[in-house]
């Protein structure tokens, strides 16, 4: 019996190393169980294989019956919990590795692949990347659409808002028919039409300090396009703690800005550049001050460009600079940003303790 149990354990471990789904691993162990039963049914008493596997089929039948009862009990318990416990929106399974690109995908991304700075290796990195987009509004809309079009393999999107008619002037990922729908599900439906080969994981809830750390740790890059200071700070703190790069954008009326933050690369974190929230009334929301419809498209597309560069390894990302765009006067400025000594979030050491 020890040999059979050792073989079952070996099958399970090999499956785990090869990242085979648990269901497939259980099937392999089930086939091993059937083979053992066949040995006891077909071979005569006293045969070495029968003796080496316990010598008696009744023992294996008892083990099989116990396994069936345990399986039925777990499934029944899961069904009862599903009926009596609310389900939290969001993906039910851990993030899985993307399979290799097929011929259709390679053709789809051909214009990237022929770019010397991206090429096949860069597109493969995009295909395997996991990017979390915080906010499915004005900035999140173009970011999500261009990440999906670029072939970013897994895109998470978190937002607790619903689509409103006032959003449609600038939030291009949402359609008129989606009015009243949670933004993350509206965005998921649109991205499925943009590129069916990417995986979109919707989180229909607000990101806060209590949940940010666990969620951010599942991703390679985070893009922040929200207008809530508390959420921005929670996202930044989680990214610094996990060592995950952060791209942040903001806009109001006719002006927008974009920067990339990663202290591990010698740059500042968001809190280094913005140690305090703006005073009341100095940074009004889009609802209060208004915003030019195409402006989120300009800034959001810049954020998507930085994301593609960071993931693929192309060019020089905005680790030490911020771009400020004034649409009214058609002016663009690029300013240098540096770590702030004593920053309570990252220490202000630029990745050097």
Image (spheres, rainbow, N blue to C red):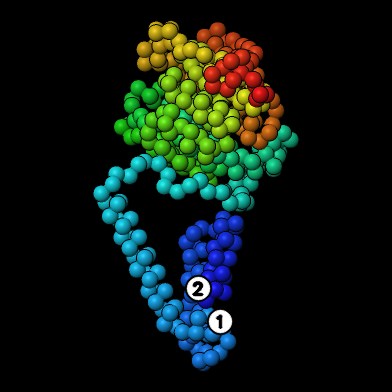
- Return the residue nearer the eye: 25 or 50: 50
Q: Quadrant of residue 302?
A: top right
Of callouts 2 and 1, the N-terminal one: 2
Q: Residues within 10 Å of mark 2 (few under 14, many from 20)?
A: few
Q: Which residue is mark 2?
A: 31
Q: As rendered, which of 313 and 214 lies closer to the eye?
A: 214
Q: Distance of mark 2 from mark 1, alpha carbons?
A: 18 Å
**Which residue is at 44% across, 19% downward?**
229
Instruction: Point out residue 142 in the picture as x, y percentages from the top left corner.
Output: 50, 29
Q: Residue at position x 64%, y 31% from top?
A: 310
Image point (40%, 41%), residue name: 90
Residue position marked by numbered label 1 in the rendering = 52
> Residue 93 location, x and y as percent?
45, 48
Report the residue at 52% width, 37% height from top.
217
Residue 216 seen in this snapshot: yes
> Which residue is at the far left?
84
Residues under numbered marks 2 and 1 in contact, where contact means CB atoms less than 8 Å apart: no
Say left or right for 95 vs 207.
right
The image shows residue 153 at horizontal and vertical percentages of 56, 42
């Amino acid at each position: 019996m020890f040999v059979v149990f050792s073989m079952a354990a070996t099958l399970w471990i090999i499956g785990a190393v090869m990242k085979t789904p648990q269901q497939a691993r259980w099937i392999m162990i089930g086939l091993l169980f059937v083979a053992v039963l066949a040995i006891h049914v077909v071979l005569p008493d006293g045969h070495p294989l029968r003796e080496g596997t316990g010598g008696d089929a009744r023992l294996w039948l008892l083990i099989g019956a116990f396994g069936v009862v345990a399986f039925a009990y777990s499934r029944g318990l899961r069904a009862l919990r599903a009926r009596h416990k609310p389900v939290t929106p969001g993906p039910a399974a851990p993030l899985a590795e993307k399979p290799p690109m097929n011929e259709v995908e390679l053709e789809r991304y051909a214009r990237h692949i022929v770019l010397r700075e991206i090429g096949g290796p860069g597109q493969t990195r995009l295909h395997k990347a996991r990017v979390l987009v915080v906010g499915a509004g004005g900035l999140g809309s173009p970011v999500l659409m261009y990440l999906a079009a670029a072939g970013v393999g897994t895109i998470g999107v978190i937002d607790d808002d619903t689509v409103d008619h006032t959003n449609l002037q600038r939030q291009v990922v949402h359609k008129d028919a989606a009015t009243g729908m949670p933004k993350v599900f509206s965005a998921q439906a649109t991205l499925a039409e943009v590129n069916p080969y990417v995986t979109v994981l919707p989180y229909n809830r607000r990101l806060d300090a209590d949940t940010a750390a666990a969620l951010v740790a599942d991703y390679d890059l985070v893009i922040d396009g929200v207008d809530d200071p508390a959420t921005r700070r929670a996202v930044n703190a989680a990214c610094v703690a996990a060592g995950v790069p952060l791209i942040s954008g903001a806009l109001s009326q006719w002006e927008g800005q974009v920067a990339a933050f990663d202290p591990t690369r010698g740059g500042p974190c968001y809190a280094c550049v913005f140690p305090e929230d703006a005073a009341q009334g100095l940074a009004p929301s889009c609802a209060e001050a208004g915003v030019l419809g195409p402006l989120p498209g300009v800034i959001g597309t810049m954020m998507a460009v930085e994301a593609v560069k960071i993931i693929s390894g192309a060019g020089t990302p905005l680790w030490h600079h911020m771009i400020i765009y004034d649409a009214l006067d058609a002016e663009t400025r690029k300013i240098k940003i540096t770590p702030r000594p004593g920053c309570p979030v990252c220490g202000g050491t630029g990745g050097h303790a």
